[in-house]
Amino acid sequence: LGRVWLVGLALLFTPAAAHAEWQAKPFGGVTFGGSTTFVNLDGAAGKPRLNLGASSTWLGNVLGVEGDVATTSGFFNGDPKLTTTLTQRSHVATVTGNVVVAMPRHRAQYGLRPYAVGGVGMMHVGFDDKFSALPFSNWLSAWDVGGGATGFLNNVVGLNWDVRMFRTLRSEPGVSGVSYGPERLSFWRLTMGFAIRL
């Protein structure tokens, strides 16, 4: 994570910084395609779940840096209508610092401006079952990679589409007793939101 911010500081001193801008991006979407070694009592990890979050991006002509936070409630929960559902509550949250590589601003003009993004951060995983037999709550190191596109409707407000994959950075030792081997989790996130020039 420290290296990501060092790159960002270096970007501040490039000539492109004169044409840089800050963007705030609140978004909503879904997480899907999850894979995990955690005990998945309801077999629900990886099913589509509502995701909410926001990011703040400093973007120059091509390169930029970004901070991104998001949370998904009920990540491990089964169907609440079924009496056999064992997971009472669960969530997955991500906090990442990323490097952004975007199409040069003069080429995008007033059309869509695609970008690629990748970085590292932390993933918080939490869940509890009805009997409190296998509770878990911990921060795991993680990385993410993906891309998207931003299109501005005017000089201030636009729309943003984004897809990313999140994965724990390394195999954590399975000392909690709630995973089959090292604790690992990965999933995809698809979002749409606003882009606001600050």
Image (spheres, grey):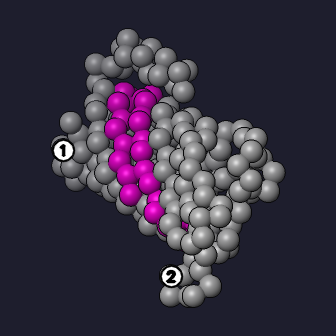
Residue holding disc 1: 156
Residue 188 in which image quadrant: bottom right
Task: Inspect this view and state whether residue 186 appears.
Answer: yes
Crowding around mark 2 (Cα neighbors within 10 Å: few <14, some 14 to 19, many 20+) is few
Percent x, y for residue 128?
A: 56, 63
Q: Quadrant of residue 121?
A: top right
How far apart are the two marked residues, 2 and 1, measured between alpha carbons? 42 Å
At x 47%, y 59%, the residue is 72
Viewed as shown, does residue 109 lie left or right of 120?
Answer: left
Residue positioned most to the bottom: 82
**Circle 2 is placed at which residue position?**
80
Q: Earlier in the sequence, mark 2 or mark 1?
A: 2
The quadrant in which the C terminus is found is: top left
Three-letter residue code for mark 1: Val
Give how far across and how far down residue 51 sits, in percent. Answer: 43, 61
| Residue span colored magenta | 52-77
Where's residue 197, x and y in %?
A: 23, 40
- Mark 1, residues whose alpha carbon is within 10 Å: few (<14), some, or many (≥20)? few
